[in-house]
Amino acid sequence: MTTPAQPIKVVIAARTAVGRAFREALASAGIEVAADCRSSAELLEAVGRERPDVCILDRELSGGGLVATAAIAAPHRAPHVLIVGGYGSAAERRAARLAGAADCLPLDVDAAHLAAAVTALARKEHT
């Protein structure tokens, strides 16, 4: 688990333009991205290699954002997963949580809210 003195380790898995927006949002908050993936297969490799605190997944990720969430959220000490995409409806949030995501935000989330969500998840104990 990350402590306040340790940097937050984040892995992003998203389409190119969406991933770039996520990286910029996190950089503006001083959060560094350990890996940037374009598919669920790349994400699974990066999670094993980087052991991130938080993974940010584009709901429309190649290979399936919710499928990737279920694959990485199950193991003990898995990173917290934040799904970003869709419109933030109750049904979308429920699907993300059932897949194992810790949180779900709409695609139009602003930079400050994205960074705050990542920081909160990195400091949250796994339950």
Image (cartoon, grey):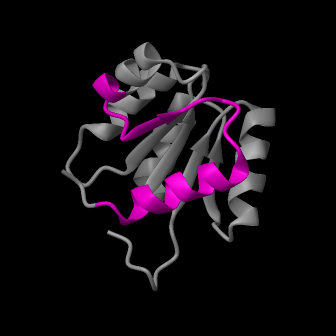
The quarter in which the N terminus is drawn is bottom left
Residue 98 in the image, given as x and y percentages of width and height: 29, 23
Is 113 inside the magenta-drawn segment? Answer: yes
Can residue 52 be seen? no
Q: Quick one: 51 or 29, which is closer to the camera? A: 29
Q: Is residue 63 above or below residue 53?
A: above
Lateral position of residue 66 relative to residue 108, left or right: left
Q: Residue at x 44, y 59 (%)?
A: 120
Furthest residue toward top: 91
Residue 67 in the image, given as x and y percentages of width and height: 41, 21
Is 98 inside the magenta-drawn segment? Answer: yes
Furthest residue toward bottom: 5
Can residue 95 be seen? yes
Q: Is residue 41 above or below residue 95?
A: below
Residue 23 in the image, given as x and y percentages of width and height: 72, 52
Q: Quick one: 24 or 64, which is closer to the camera? A: 24
Q: Residue at x 51, y 68 (%)?
A: 8
Lateral position of residue 2 relative to residue 32, left or right: left
Residue 21 in the image, given as x and y percentages of width and height: 77, 44
Q: Is residue 29 above or below residue 12?
A: below
Residue numbers of the magenta segment: 97-124
Q: Residue at x 37, y 66 (%)?
A: 123
What is the tally of numbered marks visible in this picture? 0
Q: Residue at x 38, y 48 (%)?
A: 80
Q: Quick one: 1 or 63, which is closer to the camera? A: 1
